[in-house]
Image (cartoon, helix red, strand yellow):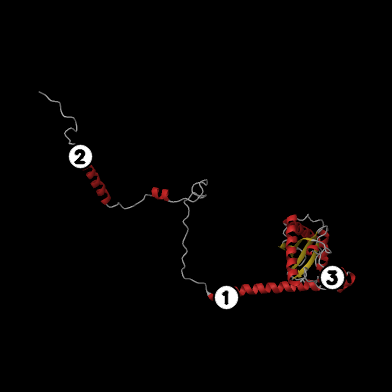
Amino acid sequence: MATAPPEAGASRQDTPPEAKTGQDDATAKAERSKPDAPYAPTEERAAAERPILVPGHLLGEGLTGKPPSTGRTLRNTGEEPDPKAVARQQAEDAREKVDGWAQDSLASARAESGAPSPYFAKLQKDFSKELVNPPPPDLKVLASRMKREQVEAIERFGKTGSPYAPKERDHRLEQRNRFQAAVEAGRAANMFMVDVTEPILALAAIVEVRQARDGKVLDLQVIEGSGDPRFDEWAVSQLREALARADAPGDGGVGIHDDGMRSRWRLKEFLGNPRVQIHLIGVY
């Protein structure tokens, strides 16, 4: 009699659960006992693991589209500058500074003594004619100046007992106006430590003028700004116009040189005054 063939796997004996569990444990131990393969990440994996600190809204990885820089290392090679060369450079810098201070002091002394050539007095009159109706001062700059001057006055009052800066004593002024003399000497203090007898200074600047021997302008620049660029630009423009119409200097005189002339001027704008005051403060 024919019999049906056994089902696939019927000849395989079922493994008891206890034996199967033991085989799984042995397999797991064998896997754990295998040595780890050397770690060799690919370029793609390294790029994926590298942190990117550049904001994502930028093109690529930063504006250059290149990976972020990892910086650089500076190494001390042990080389040092020549001490003699450094000393010479420092001495030269010091000499230039001292020479500049000496020249500025002499230039100020010439201007204050009234020794310069009459050409500069005439030039001052020409400047004054042009420095009329300046642009209104910047209120922020004006408020900042007044605040700074108020703080300085309070500091002087604490140190000297007077809020006003010392000035050269004018005996004729004292005889004509005793109250003004008392204010200048610090014996009368006004409200908020402000001298109400003097006009309120709004802006001040210093310009330097370089001219050829015939009076032609070589350079005109602001060396100490007022804090208001509009006023500085206006002042330079007005001074250039005055210099363009000024007469050539005469023969000789303090400040007149064959290789040219150099002078410094202080400009002051006061509130309510349509004219800007200008004073010669240096003749080189």
80 with respect to 157 (left or right): left
Q: In this rendering, does residue 192 appear at all?
A: yes
Q: In the rendered view, tell whether residue 45 sits above or below residue 250.
A: above
Point out the frontmost of discs 2 and 3.
2
Q: Which is nearer the N-term, disc 1 or disc 2?
A: 2
Say which of 256 and 185 sits in front.
Answer: 185
Q: Quadrant of the N terminus?
A: top left
Residue reaching furthest to the left? 1
> Splitting the image into 4 quarters, where does residue 110 fall?
bottom right
Residue reaching furthest to the right? 176
**Residue at x 89% of width, y 72% of height:** 175
Q: In the rendered view, tell whether residue 41 sits above or below residue 256.
A: above
Q: Label 3 belongs to which residue?
A: 182
17 with respect to 91 (left or right): left
- Total numbered labels: 3
Where residue 65 appears, as percent x and y from the top left, is 49, 49
Mark 2 residue element: loop
Badge 2 amino acid? Pro
Mark 1 residue element: helix
Where residue 205 appears, as percent x and y from the top left, is 75, 62
Which disc number belongs to residue 87?
1
Separation of marks 3 and 1 at Cα, in angstroms: 54 Å
Q: Which is nearer the N-term, disc 3 or disc 1?
A: 1
Separation of marks 2 and 3 at Cα, in angstroms: 120 Å
> Splitting the image into 4 quarters, where does residue 224 fall?
bottom right
Q: Give the crowd class for mark 3: few <14, some 14-19, many >=20 residues within 10 Å.
A: few
Say which of 185 and 280 sits in front.
Answer: 185
Q: Label 2 belongs to which residue?
A: 16
Point out the frontmost of discs 3 and 1.
3
Q: Which is nearer the N-term, disc 2 or disc 3?
A: 2
Badge 3 amino acid? Ala
